[in-house]
């Protein structure tokens, strides 16, 4: 007897933070176009806030260092997910764990669609010699392809849509002065080649501070928090938010910004999630690889045009342009000029 409930798809994207945020942008449009569908998003528990208000999306946490560690833990996760009686699997990760899970579901007769990462094209884009420098398919479209292969004809809008989220009470005093713009800066990233030199970033912060804009610093651990708090002491209008709020609260604060200045990092994708314009700074990586924030515009990417770029898809390799790091070729005035262009 056929179940009289909505079709259910399991969706796998186990890490990393920026990619999971991109998936959330895609799932929002999937559910708008397929309202009779139910999605079970499987990812690490800290990323749950990305999916909090998407209708018919159930979040199932993945604990790689706890209950789901190793082969035994992965089989335990498989048993947990079977309880949803899925009609299909959308593997948006295609790593060892997600492929193993997909194989187990395939053995039970469940249809599986898996991500094409485009590894050959990305290798050609980033290799040192004989690069093929052309824009590759955006990752969000690759994610959408997985659903299309399962029979769901998703059409992505690639548009920013502002979603104002309720501010946490502790953040409301930061928004009490409406005389100037509110600018978020996320100057850090997981890999050093993706980070704009901090002394140069200080020049940009100094410009914004002298304009009287409120400046909020996002993202990072203990060392980044120390740096941001140093800027807070140095500049009158700088507020370090690192370590002060939860991820859900950070998203809410970002939704009230006028603009976000960020590296090629998770914070760019968080800005996209709430429909906020992001100016992004690119060095070793390049928007051509397909990781530009959802709905963000290529003209808002701040970078130098050099045949040596990019050297890396993920930013874990340095990028030297005629012996100089590609980030060093971006003067602070280039970023300031872009800020002025958009009226900040």
Image (spheres, helix red, strand yellow):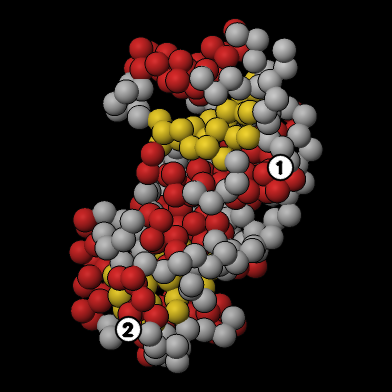
Identify the image quadrant of the N terminus.
Answer: top right
Q: Earlier in the sequence, mark 1 or mark 2?
A: 1
For marks 1 and 2, give the one nearer the viewer: 1
Task: From the viewer's perspective, tell me whether residue 329 is left or right of residue 224.
Answer: right
- What residue is shown with label 1? 35
SS at circle 2: loop
Where is mark 2, residue-wise? 237
Image location of residue 107, percent across then percent down: 59, 7
Q: Secondary structure at mark 1?
A: loop
Q: Is residue 225 visible?
A: yes
Residue at image position (52%, 76%) is 258
Give the x, y percent position of residue 226.
20, 64
Q: Residue at x 42, y 44 (%)?
A: 47
Q: Is residue 312 above or below residue 67?
A: below
Q: Is residue 214 above or below residue 50?
A: below
Q: Is residue 56 above or below residue 196?
A: above
Residue at the spot 61% in from the left edge and 22% down from the top edge: 86
Tell whether 107 sits left or right of 216. right
């Amino acid at each position: 007897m056929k179940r009289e409930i909505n079709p259910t798809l399991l969706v796998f994207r186990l890490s990393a933070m920026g990619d999971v945020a991109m998936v959330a942008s895609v799932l929002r449009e999937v559910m708008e176009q397929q309202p009779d569908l139910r999605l079970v998003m499987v990812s690490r528990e800290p990323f749950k806030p990305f999916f909090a208000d998407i209708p018919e999306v159930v979040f199932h946490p993945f604990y790689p260092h706890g209950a789901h560690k190793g082969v035994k833990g992965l089989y335990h996760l498989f048993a947990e997910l079977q309880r949803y009686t899925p009609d299909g699997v959308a593997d948006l990760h295609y790593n060892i764990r997600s492929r193993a899970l997909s194989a187990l579901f395939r053995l039970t007769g469940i249809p599986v669609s898996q991500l094409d990462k485009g590894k050959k094209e990305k290798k050609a884009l980033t290799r040192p010699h004989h690069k093929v420098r052309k824009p590759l398919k955006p990752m969000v479209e690759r994610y959408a392809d997985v659903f299309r292969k399962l029979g769901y004809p998703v059409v992505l809008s690639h548009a920013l849509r502002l979603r104002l989220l309720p501010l946490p009470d502790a953040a409301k005093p930061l928004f009490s002065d409406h005389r100037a713009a509110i600018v978020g800066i996320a100057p850090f990233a997981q890999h050093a080649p993706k980070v704009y030199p901090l002394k140069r970033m200080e020049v940009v912060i100094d410009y914004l501070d002298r304009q009287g804009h409120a400046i909020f610093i996002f993202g990072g651990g203990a060392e980044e928090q120390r740096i941001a708090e140093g800027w807070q002491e140095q500049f009158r209008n700088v507020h370090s938010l690192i370590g002060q709020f939860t991820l859900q609260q950070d998203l809410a604060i970002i939704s009230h910004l006028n603009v976000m200045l960020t590296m090629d990092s998770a914070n760019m994708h968080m800005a996209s999630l709430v429909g906020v314009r992001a100016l992004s700074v690119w060095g070793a990586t390049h928007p051509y690889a397909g990781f530009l924030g959802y709905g963000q515009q290529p003209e808002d990417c701040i970078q130098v045009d050099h045949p040596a770029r990019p050297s890396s898809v993920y930013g874990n390799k340095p990028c030297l342009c005629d012996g100089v790091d590609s980030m060093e070729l971006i003067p602070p005035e280039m970023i300031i000029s872009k800020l002025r262009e958009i009226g900040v």
